[in-house]
Image: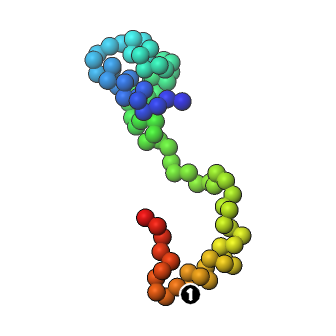
Amino acid sequence: MVTDQQGRLLRQKCMENKTQEVVEEPAGMSTRSARTWEAGPLPSETKGPQAWRTRPDPSEQVWEREVVPVLCRDEAGWCRPRR
């Protein structure tokens, strides 16, 4: 996996008018990877937001039954999220 730091280093060396073979070694990537990341977005800019859960929700079973009624009864606003 290519990091943003490697991509920035690759582009910096390319701007110094060095050949791609010379540039790819300090950036720590192969010729094929260097060609891919030479132009365009950095690796982190190509990732989308995560759309799946990484672990089960521990409060899922009690949320509707216990937490929602407490929040609905709280007219004074004592139950607020922490900052």
Q: Quadrant of residue 35?
A: top left
Q: Residue at x 52, y 85 (%)?
A: 74
Question: In the rendering, at what x and y percent does residue 45 appear?
Answer: 43, 42
Say which quarter of the image contains residue 52. Answer: bottom right
Q: Is residue 20 visible?
A: no
Above/below status of 57 relative to 27 = below
| Residue 78 percent across, percent down from the top left | 48, 80
Q: Nearer the viewer, residue 59 or 44?
A: 59
Camera-side residue: 55 or 36? 55
The extreme left residue here reads 16
Which residue was labeled with disc 1? 73
Q: Secondary structure at mark 1?
A: helix
In the rendered image, the quadrant that contains the C terminus is bottom left
Q: From what the image shows, is residue 78 above or below residue 52?
A: below
**Mark 1 residue crowding within 10 angstroms, few (<14) / some (14–19) / many (20+):** few
The quadrant in which the N terminus is found is top right
Q: How is the image coloured?
A: rainbow
37 is higher (above) or lower (below) than 20: below
Q: Is residue 80 in sight in this rendering?
A: yes
- Which residue appears at 27% of the width and 17% of the height? 16
Q: Residue at the front extreme?
A: 78
Which residue occupies the foreground of this view, 33 or 26?
26
Q: Position of residue 4 (x, y in %)?
A: 42, 33
Which residue is painted at 37% across and 24% down in the image? 9
Residue 83 to residue 6: above or below: below
* Residue drawn at (56%, 51%) of the image: 50
Say which amino acid is labelled 1: Arg
Judge from the rendering whether residue 4 lies leftward or rightward of residue 54; answer left or right. Answer: left
Give the side of residue 47 with respect to residue 10, left or right: right
